[in-house]
Image (cartoon, rainbow, N blue to C red):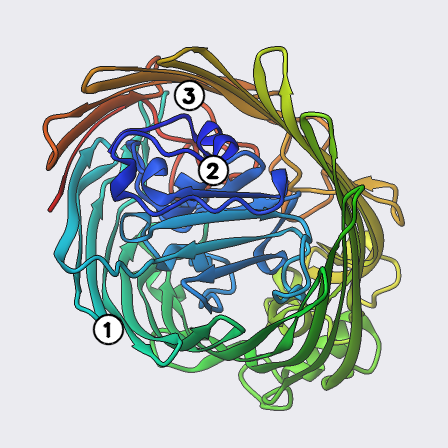
């Protein structure tokens, strides 16, 4: 597989060498979306999905260990970024985000990755997409016969990684089976210190399609399991996380219907994979279940196209903090929480001579509850913890109706394409923000059942075209948020009853804004130069504080060249100093120095079947941490934050048959 400069591939909608064997690129609405073959991201010493997604312009990530790098888009993370895994949504099993949804789908068994920045459509759920949406998809191949691909990779970070995808197709049916395995190592940072990052991941599954009438019916099943994952940025590690996904659908010319069910079983503890005080051994078993579906229909009314439908999602979460010695429940971190959403949407696209108008509306009916809010454990009931923390009577059940609106205008400006998007959308507090109930005196972590939903009013401008011998993309956006859900410490908020260091959630008004600029130059018929830079700003207007977790200026510059059967290149990754921080926030990691690293790589197409790729990441062994990375647990290392890997050599051999 040949690595073409990432953004150049999306900008030109053209594939690198071996184009005939890769899934087609689908570019949606200029710079608001980047859809790329997943393989373009995998030529790296790294192998974890969230880590690899950080190569995309506008996508960042927070590292807590070797696995589960948590994506950040538009300065927002966790439940503010929607993740769809081959059409299915999955609720993370860990309250501390050890397993974001991206951790349950390996890019080696994926075909395409799409990054939707901000709100670009209301035909997809937006209640958990105020920052953006990441779509990972697998395609069915209808080419008759048996064919597939396989790869093996090894690096300083990965002891071994294997992936295989096989597709068998006939006249009216096709079947794809896939599997992957990765054994990751602890790694050495640029200071020569060991960073605990081991994990083992295994996944396997199948996807089938059958032509029925004028459409195609599909069904898929997958199991993904991560074992012995170390997290030096947390107080616990994870002996296992296991996800199971089932989905089915039917697509025809006039629309499609999709159904899915996902479940996650997760365990974290402080003694299986690290040394703990024998009297303080603790564990947190969790389970989550998510069921959902969507019906999408298309109708044509003269030149106007109408997309409309209904969708639903039902989510259940349980997490119990236990004394490992006797199994006694100490706290109900997720006290049997429920989230139910039923939605209807419609979106019209109408072309005019001057441009194309898009108008959309979505109505969400949302119910949330915590069924075990009155269940007593060693620390009392969740309801009593909410009451003592906030000093108000907690409203456990919520029923809300939210109306979301969108308007867009897309038009040509000579050789350029311009698109404006205005939206007003709502985001419901998630299970952690509303119902978390971990009682530990001044170290408690307490959700707020009385939180209001966030209202995001966004404006985006996307511009793409040619100038100065380059192909450019610009993405500028601003987001004014009423009732932004702020994670803070009780001592900082006079409106709550507690006055200590416990973690709480309160509504504030906030603003976020930013820009991503990317340019690609074809220096000659074989050489590409791509540069990209992203800026994000976030501010708490109510308390006159910066928002924590907002990345500094960052980006990359990449030079690549094709020559015969070879392709080789260099990439400089960089970030500036981070000084505009919120020192009061529990999530603040502090001021971070700027950094720059150099990666080198080469691909060799041996023949039509075999290809070899190799490279060196962080050539000069620079010691650094991304600003978004978690603080290091003092018992797990000497650095202040979880540092990124030092110099890492990698090699990958792949085959197509």
Regarding residue 535, the answer to whether it shows in the image is no
Q: Secondary structure at mark 3?
A: loop
Residue 225 is left or right of residue 368, and the answer is left
Q: Residue at x 69, y 28 (%)?
A: 416
Question: Do the residues under discs 1 and 3 have CB atoms within 8 angstroms?
Answer: no
Image location (x, y in percent) of residue 243:
34, 69
Q: Quadrant where the N terminus lies?
A: top left
Rendered image quadrant of residue 167 = bottom left
Image location (x, y in percent) of residue 562:
29, 16
For mark 3, what is the residue? Answer: 623
Give the CA separation, mark 1 to mark 3: 55 Å
Which-is-in-front pick, marks 1 and 3? Answer: 1
First-in-chain label (1 vs 3): 1
Regarding residue 373, the answer to whether it shows in the image is yes
For mark 2, what is the residue? Answer: 54
Q: Secondary structure at mark 1?
A: loop
Which-is-in-front pick, marks 3 and 2? Answer: 2
Residue 229 position (above or below residue 310): above
First-in-chain label (1 vs 2): 2
Image location (x, y in percent) of residue 157:
26, 35
Which of the pair 483/494 is nearer the observer? 483
For mark 1, what is the residue? Answer: 172
Residue 64 is left or right of residue 470, and the answer is left
Residue 273 position (above or below residue 123): above
């Amino acid at each position: 597989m040949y690595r073409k400069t990432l953004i150049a591939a999306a900008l030109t909608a053209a594939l690198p060498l071996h184009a005939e064997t890769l899934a087609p690129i689908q570019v949606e609405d200029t710079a608001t979306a980047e859809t790329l073959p997943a393989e373009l991201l995998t030529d790296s010493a790294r192998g974890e999905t969230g880590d690899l997604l950080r190569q995309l312009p506008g996508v960042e990530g927070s590292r807590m260990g070797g696995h589960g790098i948590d994506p950040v888009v538009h300065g927002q993370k966790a439940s503010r970024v929607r993740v769809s895994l081959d059409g299915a949504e999955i609720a993370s099993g860990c309250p501390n985000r050890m397993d974001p949804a991206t951790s349950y789908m390996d890019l080696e068994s994926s075909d395409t990755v799409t990054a939707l920045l901000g709100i670009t459509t209301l035909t997809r759920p937006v209640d958990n997409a105020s920052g953006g949406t990441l779509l990972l998809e697998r395609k069915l191949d209808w080419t008759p016969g048996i064919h597939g691909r396989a790869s093996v990779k090894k690096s300083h970070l990965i002891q071994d990684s294997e992936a295989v995808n096989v597709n068998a197709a006939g006249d009216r049916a096709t079947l794809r089976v896939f599997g992957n395995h990765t054994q990751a190592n602890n790694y050495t940072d640029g200071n020569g210190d060991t960073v605990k990052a081991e994990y083992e991941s295994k996944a396997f599954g199948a996807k089938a399609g059958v032509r029925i009438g004028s459409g195609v019916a599909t069904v898929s099943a997958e199991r993904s399991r991560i074992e012995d994952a170390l997290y030096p940025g947390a107080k616990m590690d994870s002996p296992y996380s296991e996800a199971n996904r089932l989905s089915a659908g039917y697509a025809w010319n006039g629309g499609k219907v999709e159904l899915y069910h996902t479940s996650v079983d997760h365990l974290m503890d402080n003694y299986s994979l690290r040394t703990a005080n024998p009297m303080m051994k603790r564990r947190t078993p969790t389970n989550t279940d998510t069921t959902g579906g969507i019906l999408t229909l298309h109708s044509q009314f003269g030149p106007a196209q109408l997309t409309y439908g209904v969708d639903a999602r039902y989510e259940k979460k349980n997490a119990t903090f236990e004394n490992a010695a006797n199994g006694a429940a100490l706290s109900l971190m997720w006290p049997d929480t429920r989230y139910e959403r039923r939605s209807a949407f419609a979106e019209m696209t109408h072309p005019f001579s001057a441009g194309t108008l898009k108008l959309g509306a979505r109505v969400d009916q949302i119910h949330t509850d915590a069924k075990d809010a009155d269940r007593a454990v060693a620390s009392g009931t969740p309801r009593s913890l909410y009451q003592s923390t906030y000093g108000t009577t907690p409203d456990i059940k919520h029923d809300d109706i939210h109306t979301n609106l969108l308007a867009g205008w897309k038009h040509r400006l000579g050789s350029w394409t311009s698109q404006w998007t205005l939206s007003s959308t709502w985001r419901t507090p998630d299970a952690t923000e509303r119902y978390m109930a971990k009682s530990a005196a001044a170290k408690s972590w307490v959700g707020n059942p009385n939180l209001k939903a966030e209202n995001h009013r966004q404006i985006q401008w996307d511009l793409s075209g040619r100038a100065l011998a380059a192909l450019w993309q610009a993405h500028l956006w601003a987001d004014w948020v009423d009732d932004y859900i702020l994670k803070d410490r009780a001592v900082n908020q006079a409106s709550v009853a507690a006055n200590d260091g416990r973690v709480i959630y309160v509504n504030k008004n906030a603003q976020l804004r930013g820009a991503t600029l990317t340019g690609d130059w074809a220096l000659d018929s074989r050489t590409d130069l791509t540069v990209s830079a992203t800026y994000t700003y976030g501010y708490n207007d109510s308390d006159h504080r910066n928002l924590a977790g907002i990345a500094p200026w960052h980006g990359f510059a990449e030079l690549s060249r094709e020559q015969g059967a070879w392709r080789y290149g260099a990439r400089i990754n960089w970030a500036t100093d981070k000084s505009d921080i919120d020192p009061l926030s529990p999530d603040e990691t502090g001021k971070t120095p700027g950094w720059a690293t150099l990666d080198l790589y080469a691909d060799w197409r041996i023949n039509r079947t075999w290809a070899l790729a190799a490279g060196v990441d962080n050539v000069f062994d620079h010691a650094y941490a991304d600003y978004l990375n978690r603080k290091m647990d003092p018992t797990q290392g000497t650095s202040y934050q979880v540092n990124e890997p030092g110099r890492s050599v990698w090699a990958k051999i792949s085959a197509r048959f």
